[in-house]
Image (tube, coloured by chain):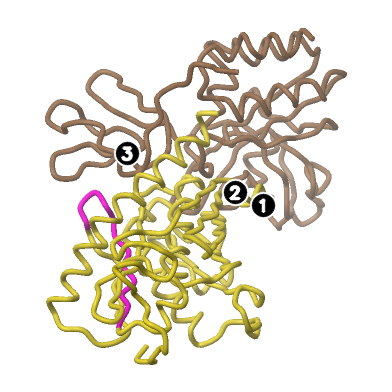
Chain colours: A brown, B yellow
Amino acid sequence: MMTEVRKIVLPGEVLGDSKEKKSGYGTFEEDGRVISKFIGIPKEARDYISVIPLSGVYIPKRQDKVIGFITDVERVGWVVDINSPWLAFLPVSEAVDEFIDLKKTDITRFYDVEDVIYAQVDNVKRADIKLTMNTPVARKLRGGITVKIAPSKVPRLIGKEGSMINTIKDKTNTIIRVGQNGVVWLSGEGVKKAIKAIRMVDEKSHIIGLTDEITKLLSD
Amino acid sequence: MGMKSKEKMIVKGKRLDGRNPDEIREIEMKVGVIPNANGSAQVSFGRTTAVAAVYGPRILHPRRLQEPNTAIIRCRYNMAPFSVDERIRPGPSRRETEISKVTRLALEPALFLEKYPETVVDIYIEIIQADGSTRVTGINAASLALADAGVPMRDLVVGLSGGKLDDTIIIDLCGKEDNYSVADIPIAFLPRKNEITLLQMDGQMNPDEVKTIVKNVLNAGKKVYEKQKEVLKKKYHK
């Protein structure tokens, strides 16, 4: 099957002159030229050239909504694995609204090891990442299953104004939550089919006309 | 090295395997051979085959090794016991420890690691079949694996060896040539600006010969570079 594919650049590939275009995300400047850092898809927006990587780990940013796994309970909060090179921390004050006497309460009654949460990145200081549940969408995700995709492909999975993810949700009748860290949580009847579609987006994110292919896959 | 062979190594301008002195062996490259790794690659130069896997950037333990400003690289070069004719004892030997280190130093200049403080990028290179020039084959595999893993890079890294056999300057030595050569030089470089990141020499040569070999390797390395680029693009152009 021949499909049209977006242009792919490689690390070290010269993208343009730095006098005409500024170096954006995924690029660097050297000797007056803009050069790519990643294997990825080049994008030109206003006077910037950037490269969207096709692989790589998740780097937490403020305000990102992520899906995390509680890996440890400490005295004043929880240690959360957010699929990035660093572990994140969720303090009790950012997780619970009511007053809690830490001397008397066992905080595992809110979240315990192996729980899955949908949270927001509150602050990032070098390798120190703080999460918060103080946002309307944040919650504990009960049941369901999680799959991981490349974090750089999350925007593709969501699509323009959620077109892609809504297609998958409607066609398979599942509840899906996508974390910006590349973790996807699913629950409902058509989970198997939905996972198949998500895997396809992950593998073929660089193909033009992917939404149509996904629709075709889901209608069979 | 310095060993005298009974047979002539170069007859009528052709080498043992029928190559010209300035000809490299057949190259085969594959990307994404290990699904569990963040990035991986397999590279063959003739009968030398290396598999490289990259994990990370990921949390670094023990914590005392963590650097507050940057990620560090851990590199392991390992020869499989069955990779050579006579079984070699498994486990890091003096030679493997040294090659691990020079490989790390050859790859480090190509990477941007400042964005990943307190983490590590693990590079594992396994030589599953050895027939000369294993360290440069390993570097080629590691370069592809790093690009595949999405670690930010200045450029791909190309490795290629050169040497002197009898009185001829040759390139890309095979195992036997390596054993009987007067000298051999493994070289790794960043092709965009021809910056050399690895240059070792084993044997004796005069400065002019060394210069010729470096020039030849930088030239022939362009072919390896093109092959690397082609293979990385092919992963997404199926």
Mark 1, residue position: A79
Mark 2, residue position: A88
- B156 to the left or right of B237: left
Label 1, secondary structure: give it. strand
Q: Amino acid at mark 1?
A: Val
Looking at the image, which is closer to me, A167 or A138? A167
Inter-mark Cα distance, 1 to 3: 35 Å
Q: Quick check: is B193 in the magenta stretch?
A: yes
The nearer-to-camera label among 3 and 2 is 3
Where on the picture, by quarter, is residue B80?
bottom right
Residue B163 screen position, x and y as percent = 30, 74
Which quadrant: the C terminus of chain B?
A: top right
Residue at 51 percent across and 43 percent down: it is A56
Question: Could you tell me if the residues under marks 2 and 1 are in contact, i.e. CB atoms within 8 Å?
Answer: yes
Chain holding disc 1? A
Where on the picture, by quarter, is residue B12?
bottom left
Residue at 66 percent across and 35 percent down: it is A183
Q: Earlier in the sequence, mark 1 or mark 3?
A: 3
Residue A181 screen position, x and y as percent = 58, 37
Q: Amino acid at mark 3?
A: Ser
Residue B102 screen position, x and y as percent = 39, 74
Label 3, secondary structure: give it. strand
Mark 3, residue position: A36
Disc 2 packing (10 Å; few <14; some 14–19; many ≥20)? many
